Image (cartoon, rainbow, N blue to C red):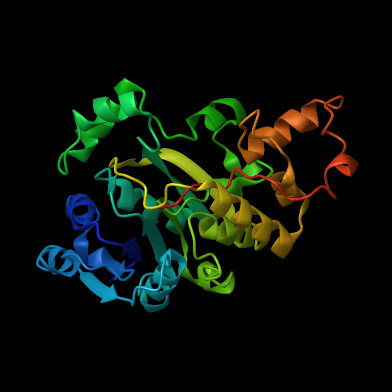
């Protein structure tokens, strides 16, 4: 019986796709309990051949949609719509899971008495050049558990680790846990995703569509959790989009225009100097009443300028 559906959008990265699928073959969760849905966003490489080469080891489906630009949200919606599992795990191509990660996702969802949205832990995301070189010296498509142990030793932590260190890992108590909902590795109940309207396909450039869905899950009272037991690593590769600043700003403005809640109003603040993610920014301003931007009257009507919307690839 299929209980979990893994939805993977991809675009001309067949080698990375193969690495991700290899990590799924090595899962401790019974292969009868999950399916893998690969949605090709108009790619022209051999991704279909790679996906089908795993058909004797995984319950895998491959779909191709016409190349009409960046449509990762559309790809994930297609995968979610046809998914048979009660729970959906979203993975990016090039994210490799620890062997027990799917089993832990399923366990957490099944024992929860409340709908939950799980934020997976992703080692090695957005490292600097030196960090990438160190990481590349130890990674391979196999033995992910051992690799994760070495990455932990290297300090190649999830880029959000500094937030966890300061604010704690009980993210359901954070003011804006949706800001961590990066679909490189997350999961949620399929019916909750459908109830929330799935991904807004107006986000057709880099970034924002995952956090936007996270806002709606948050407003629908899904409880957000994170735990290192649901671990993975991000295989280094060039970003598809190099100039991400304008895309992020547009995404932030669209998100706040849609929901107009106090948390998203903080996306409007010019905090590039401090380079603070949303939840840390809120904490700083809430705890610093003399800060020039602590008074909401100073910023709620300011022009929308900047953002810390999470990156997606």
* Residue 186 image position (x, y, % from top left): 43, 53
Q: Is residue 181 left or right of residue 5?
A: right
Residue occupying image coordinates x 60% and y 37%: 277
Marker count (numbered): 0
Residue occupying image coordinates x 29% and y 28%: 151
The quarter in which the N terminus is drawn is bottom left
* Residue 276 image position (x, y, % from top left): 62, 33
Q: Is residue 133 left or right of residue 9?
A: left
Is residue 115 visible from the viewing direction of this image? Answer: no
* Residue 51 image position (x, y, % from top left): 17, 65
Which one is in front, 40 or 288? 40
* Residue 59 image position (x, y, % from top left): 20, 69
Residue occupying image coordinates x 21% and y 39%: 144
Quadrant assignment, res 24: bottom left
Which one is in front, 127 or 192? 127
From the viewer's perspective, is residue 25 above or below residue 41? above
From the viewer's perspective, is residue 63 above or below residue 309? below
């Amino acid at each position: 019986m299929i209980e979990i559906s893994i939805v993977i959008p991809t675009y001309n990265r067949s080698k990375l796709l193969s690495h991700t699928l290899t990590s799924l073959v090595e899962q401790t969760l019974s292969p009868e309990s999950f399916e893998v849905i690969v949605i090709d966003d108009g790619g022209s490489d051999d991704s279909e051949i790679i996906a089908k080469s795993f058909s004797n080891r995984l319950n895998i489906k491959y779909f191709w949609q016409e190349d009409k630009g960046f449509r990762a949200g559309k790809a994930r919606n297609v995968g979610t719509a046809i998914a048979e599992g009660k729970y959906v795990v979203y993975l990016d191509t090039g994210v490799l899971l620890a062997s027990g990660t799917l089993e832990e996702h399923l366990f957490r969802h099944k024992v929860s008495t409340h709908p939950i949205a799980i934020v997976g832990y992703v080692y090695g995301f957005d490292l600097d050049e030196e960090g990438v070189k160190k990481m590349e010296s130890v990674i391979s498509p196999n033995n992910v558990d051992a690799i994760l142990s070495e990455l932990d030793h290297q300090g190649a932590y999830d880029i959000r680790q500094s937030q966890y260190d300061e604010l704690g890992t009980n993210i359901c108590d954070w003011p804006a846990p949706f800001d961590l909902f990066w679909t490189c590795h997350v999961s949620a109940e399929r019916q909750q995703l459908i109830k929330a309207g799935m991904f807004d396909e107006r986000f057709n450039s880099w970034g924002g569509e995952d956090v936007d869905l996270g806002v709606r899950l948050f407003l629908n009272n899904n409880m957000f959790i994170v735990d290192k037991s649901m671990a993975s690593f991000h295989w280094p590769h060039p970003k598809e989009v190099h100039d991400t600043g304008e895309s992020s700003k547009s995404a932030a403005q669209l998100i706040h225009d849609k929901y107009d809640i106090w948390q998203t109003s903080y996306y409007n603040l010019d905090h590039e100097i401090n380079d603070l993610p949303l939840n840390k920014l809120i904490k700083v301003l809430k705890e610093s009443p003399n800060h020039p931007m602590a008074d909401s009257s100073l910023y709620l009507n300011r022009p929308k300028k900047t953002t810390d919307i999470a990156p997606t690839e």
